[in-house]
Each structure stands twice: as C-alpha cells, then as structure tokens.
Amino acid sequence: MKIDKSLLFGVLIGMALGLVLAAETMHLASDRTCPGNICLGASEIVPVSDKGYFPKVHEALLNAKKSIHIAAFELKYYSNYKNSSENTIIDDIISAHERGVDVKIVLDQYSAQDNATNAYFYLKKKGVPVRYDSDKTTTHAKLVIIDGKVVVLGSTNFSYTSLELNNEVDVVLFSEEAARYFEQYFQKLWAG
C-alpha cells in the first residue's frame, strides 16, 4: 500500500499542533485573552492560512537580528518575476545574510531537479550558506527558525503555487522553548 507523503505530513502536523494546543490550553488562566492570537503563557501561537503566510514571514525575516535557519522541501526564485512574494522572501534572506545574520538553509534534493526556478544557485551566488539534504531521505519540512525565538511551520512551500494558489495552513510560534527544540532538529539536518 502506497502512502501519500503530503497527506501523511499534513496529518502529522495536525496531530502535533492539536497536542500542543490541547496541552498548553489546559494550563491557561481562564480570564486571559489575546485578541487575534492564542496566548500560551510566555508563548504565543499565531495561526496563518493561505496568503496570510507571506506578510508574516516577510516581516519576521526583515526583523531577524541573529539567525535565520530554514529547512524546506523547495525554495523557488523566479527571475522573470522580480517583485513576486517568492522572490521577496529570497531577497529578505539575502539581505539578512548581508547584514550579518547567521543564515543557513537545508533543501530537499527534489529542488535540484528544476534549475530554472531553483533558488539554491541564486542563494549560493549571493554567498548564503545553503545545502541539499542526503539523497537517501526526503526533507519535506517547511520550517523557519528566527533568532532562537520565532518558529514558522506548516504546509507552505516557498513557491508560487504554494504562496499564491494553494490552500495552506501554518503557525507562527513565538516561543523560545519551541525554537530550542526545532533548532536542535535543524542542526541535525545541517550536519547531514
């Protein structure tokens, strides 16, 4: 029986987020509110869907001071669409690298199949540390960790289809604890 990896990933993310939300919600004070967001003690979860992803990630990348670590299935750059959301994110990453932010990116080998829109070579040319994962595994993650305190994860790829057309769900976690966990995960991917 063949299992659809995208469906499995979606189910696992949903289950993980459900468990986190359930556990954290249980110890919230009953009178605490956080308009528009879900506050969790010293943490905050901001749900994001569809086209809401770009403005949140764009803002977070622009405000990065120390580090941006990304693990992604694909990262696209469209040379014919300089002002697209996808290219703006790539430009944000390059700008952060140029201002001294520690930027590291791990991409799945799948990205190497499409040299026309693959951001890998563009980022390399700009000096951004980027590498492919092992060809023995699939990095289907969509993970951004910023400054050890902001984590963005969910279903959105860094591509036109994902940012402009698809139905996507993500969360932005403002949590040093979550950032530590995902930073350890990222470092294992980076080490290969």
Image (spheres, grey):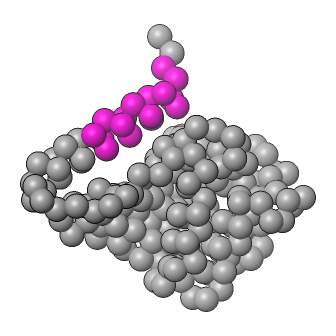
Q: In this view, does 179 lie to the left or right of 163?
A: left
Q: Residue furthest top?
A: 1
Residue 19 is situated, as x and y percent measured from the top left of the image, at 23, 41
Q: Please say if 82 is above or below 101.
A: above
Residue 190 is situated, as x and y percent measured from the top left of the image, at 48, 62
Residue 91 is situated, as x and y percent measured from the top left of the image, at 71, 72
Residue at 21%, 69% in the rendered image: 42
Residue at 59%, 68% in the rendered image: 58
Residue at 11%, 48% in the rendered image: 26
Q: Which is more toward the observer, 87 or 8? A: 87
Q: Is residue 16 left or right of residue 135?
A: left
Name the main secondary structure of what is drawn in magenta.
helix
Is residue 6 within the magenta segment?
yes
Residue at 60%, 59% in the rendered image: 54
Is residue 174 within the magenta segment?
no
Residue 167 is situated, as x and y percent measured from the top left of the image, at 58, 37
Query: Is residue 191 in sight in this rendering?
Result: no
Q: Please say if 56 is above or below 6.
A: below
Q: Is residue 77 left or right of residue 25?
A: right
Query: Which residue range is magenta in the image?
Result: 3-18
